[in-house]
Image (tube, rainbow, N blue to C red):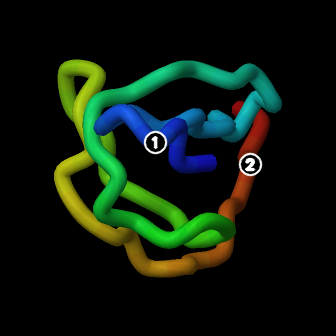
């Protein structure tokens, strides 16, 4: 969600929500986030969880 002030709300894989700098990725898309800032759009790839 774009907050309208240069920040966005981002939902992490564990369901938690954080506020990050940037608003360049459309709502519903995945993003690369580094040091609390959106770096760009991420591809929508499958996620696998393996127990060792």
- Element under label 2? loop
Residue hosting label 2: 49
In whole angstroms, how far apart are the C-alphas of marks 2 and 1? 35 Å
Q: Quadrant of residue 29?
A: bottom right
Side of 35 relative to 50 (left or right): left
Q: Position of residue 2 (x, y in %)?
A: 53, 48
**Between discs 2 and 1, the one toward the N terminus:** 1
Q: Is residue 13 left or right of residue 39?
A: right
Q: Please say if 34 is above or below 30.
A: above
Label 2 Cα crowd, 10 Å radius (few <14 / some 14-19 / many 20+) = few
Please rate how many residues cluster around mark 1, counting C-alpha atoms within 10 Å: few if below 14, some from 14 to 19, many from 20: few
- Residue located farthest toward the front when viewing the structure as drawn: 4
The residue depicted at 53 percent of the width and 37 percent of the height is 3
> In the image, which is nearer the foreground, mark 2 or mark 1?
1
Relative to 16, say whether 11 is above or below: below
Which residue is depicted at the point 55% across and 79% down? 44
Considering depth in this image, is 3 or 20 the residue closer to the camera?
3
Q: Residue at x 69, y 24 (%)?
A: 17
Horizontal and vertical percent position of residue 32: 32, 52
Q: Position of residue 47 (x, y in %)?
A: 67, 63
User: Could you say whether the residue bearing mark 1 is in a helix, strand or loop?
Assistant: loop
Q: Look at mark 1 in the image and give the residue it sits on.
A: 4
Q: Position of residue 18 (x, y in %)?
A: 57, 20
Image height check: is 35 above or below 46? above
Residue 27 lies in what quarter of the image? bottom right
The image shows residue 33, relative to residue 20, as above or below, that is below
Image quarter in which the C terminus is found: top right
Q: Is residue 37 left or right of residue 10?
A: left
């Amino acid at each position: 969600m774009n907050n309208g002030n240069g920040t966005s709300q981002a939902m992490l894989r564990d369901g938690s929500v954080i506020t990050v700098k940037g608003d360049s990725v459309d709502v519903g898309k995945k993003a690369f986030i580094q040091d609390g800032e959106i770096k760009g759009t991420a591809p929508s790839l499958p996620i696998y969880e393996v127990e060792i």
